[in-house]
Image (cartoon, rainbow, N blue to C red):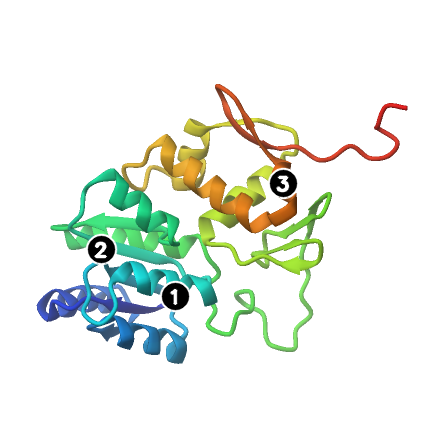
Amino acid sequence: MARILVVEDERDLNDLVARHLRQEGHEAMQAFDGPDALIAVAAAKPDLVVLDWMLPGLDGITVCRKIRDQYLVPILMLTARVEEADIILGLEVGADDYLTKPFRMRELVARVRALLRRVELDSRGLPIGESETAPIETDMITVGPISVSPDMRTALINDAELDLTPKEFDLLVLFASNPGRAFSRDYLLERIWSNEYEVTDRTVDTHVQRLRKKLGDDAGLIRTVWGIGYKLQPRPTAAQRPA
């Protein structure tokens, strides 16, 4: 069971979504405008947010950006907008998936399941099955200044924690697990997005750009391989540099 916040100003639709999520065994909370959504996120720390684009008070894009500034909770954006530029905007501000209106409840539930499979579902921020005092064992993947723990879903750059969305994290894990290997955009779409929805090469490019930005001075470690895609290229060590 996950704690899910449904943010939708159309009350009938909000009630319908919440009801289907409860039938799936989840705890569904509801908010009907932007400001209340931010209050609910801060108070309840949901495991997932279903967020409408058009909201009173604060629009969904602003709410998404504010949530992403503080939390890693996955966000499923609901929108009547179908233009690629609008979809890319939602992804750029931190949405992990989107669903265009009108939609079928079965599809929404399937999207929710897919997103929840990608994150650790523990409201205390601990790995599933661990207690607050239990020792935490995890394997770290380290490539130069980057350290990633797939089990803990944490990533560090020069020992400072990175604030990544679930898909940004999945991209970094894949790159760090295979340093020097180039991945095509098609492969990344299939591996990271798993054909969850209609996406394009631009989706991959946008997420890589966001990931690079968060790496700061080390953004150049993720290199573009022209005509193919992207790779994480470690810097040569002193012993590997030519004399």
Query: Which marked residue is nearer to the observer: mark 2 or mark 1?
Result: 1
Question: What residue sits 86% from the left and 34% below the top?
Answer: 238
Label 3: which residue? 176
Question: Of label 3 and label 1, which has the lower sequence position?
Answer: 1
Question: Of label 3 and label 2, which has the lower sequence position?
Answer: 2
| Res. 1 in view | no
Name the kind of residue labelled 1 in the image: Lys
Residue 218 in picture, x, y percent from top left:
65, 44
Label 2: which residue? 78
Question: What residue sits 59% from the left and 59% below the top?
Answer: 152
* Element on which disc 1 rests: helix
Label 1: which residue? 66
Say left or right for 114 vs 14. Answer: right
Camera-side residue: 18 or 176? Answer: 176
- Pick the quarter of the image with the C terminus: top right
| Res. 182 in view | yes
* Element on which disc 2 rests: strand
